Image: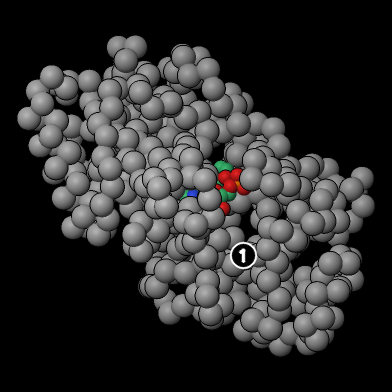
Amino acid sequence: MSHDALEALQLERLKEMAVYCYEKIGFYHRSFDEAGIDPRSIESLADIEKFPFTVKQDLRDNYPFGMWALDKRDAMRVHASSGTTGQATVVGYTRHDLDVWGECFARDIAYTGHDEPAILQVCYGYGLFTGGLGADGGGLAMNCLTVPMSSGNTKRQIQVMKDFETDILACTPSYALNIADKAIEEGYDPASEFAVSSAILGAEPCSENMRHEIENKLGVKVHDIYGLSEVMGPGVACECAEQHGLHVAEDHFLIEILDPDTHQPVPEGEWGEIVLTSLDREASPLIRYRTRDISRFLPGACPCGVTHRRIDRLQGRTDDMLIIRGVNVFPSQIEQVITEFKEVTPHYQIILSTKGSLDAVELDIETIPEFDFDEIRQVEDLKRRIGAELKSNLQIKVDLKLVAPHDIVRSEGKAKRVIDNREVKNAWEGK
Ligand code: DLL
């Protein structure tokens, strides 16, 4: 679709959506009235900037169904966030919403370029989490033979991947690495012995180095996929075969990238917070949802021919950002630096604690099995070199600890990179 045609479609959908939300959702009726906005006054896409934001707390305050545009019995599916950091957020889907979702995920499957219907092994968790059923819906939309493994039972995942001749693996990057390592431990060389050739990985940040490691170990090409439960689930943006940015499903979402402080759009190429507006969601549409995810628009047309704009792979979330002695840093940036060292693995954890009146940061990194801890000089030398690299690349100084293989718990879903043992937790929180 040409850029002009796309914008015309977006405008038509936005106009309808603003009125739909105003008429069907009490929360938006009140918030538009309070902001003095007439939802019928939209004339251009830029008018979106006049609308108030929606934040996660709004969904929590209206738990469970208060933000839905229809009676719960008129929807066909419900998903929810895990609620580990507060009240869960609950979202709904009509048949139309499920069709759109299936189509959006299907785009990433199409980007993998399989000529025939592929065999898709879904090892995202099934259930209220959107990963499993989101990927499953994509598989159905693309006529894939869909293998609904859900997460966990890694031994069985490997057996199935081998015996069923899986083409595409869908899971989190940390779980993909876990599966690869376990398969290698069991004596396989997945890159040469297994049919798997693509992986659709998302739900958490992953550095370039870690992604290369997954690609090499499994013999796959990785396609990143982005999404969040409040706004549909996986498939909001998908990475094409160019592996340079994720195409946003702009026919279904209006995306803004804003400065988190000033709320003004950042210039193309600069990092900011993703804000999303549903354009055709029926059950639980959102207007200007602040995702807290940090990315940037990539300039220019994509050689793949898809005209939807691209965002860069996510840096992290504003609330995951660490402030180490005044320096802002995301765990994914630390990951990128440490994975340059061949003596260590991408298994690491950042442990925050309180030391006196100060916050302390410990970084635990697992070494490779061949690394000899008895060679004290070698241990000290590696710590010094990693420390120097963190200092020169990120301007941070941390208490570095090298730990033995398998000391850090493996993930079957989203990896837990930061353990916060501080007495006062919010002292580190980003914006
Ligand atoms: O993680 C949905 C999903 C499932 C996406 C499977 C991709 C694949 P939530 O549990 O609501 O939903 O978490 C959403 O995860 O706001 C981001 O911070 C992070 N996230 C999602 N995709 C990516 C990605 C699912 N590709 C939150 N890269 C989002 C980095 C991601 N972070």
* Residue at 38% in and 41% down: 350
In front here: 276 or 166?
276
Q: Residue at x 83, y 48 (%)?
A: 64
Q: Residue furthest front?
A: 356
Residue 79 visible, this orientation: yes
**Camera-nearest residue between 95 and 69:** 69
| Side of 275 relative to 351 (left or right) | right
When the figure is inspected, residue 275 is found, relative to residue 106, above or below; the finding is below
Q: Residue 79 appears in which quarter of the rendering?
A: top right
Q: Three-letter amino acid code at disc 1?
A: Arg
**Is 256 on the left or on the right of 166, as rendered?**
right
Q: Position of residue 327 (x, y in %)?
A: 34, 62
Percent position (x, y) of residue 325?
Answer: 34, 59
Image x and y of residue 339, in percent: 25, 41
Question: Which residue is located at x 36 percent, y 46 percent?
Answer: 361
Question: Is 59 situated left or right of 383 in this image?
Answer: right
Decide: few, some or many residues near mark 1? Use Cα within 10 Å; few <14, some 14-19, many ≥20. Answer: many
Extreme residue toward the left, this view:
377
Q: Residue 19, located in which quarter of the rendered image?
A: bottom right
Q: Residue at x 77, y 82 (%)?
A: 35
Location of mark 1 (residue): 290
The answer to whether any part of residue 143 appears in the image is no
Q: Quadrant of the N terminus?
A: bottom right
Report x, y in % for residue 213.
29, 36
Secondary-structure class at tag 1: strand
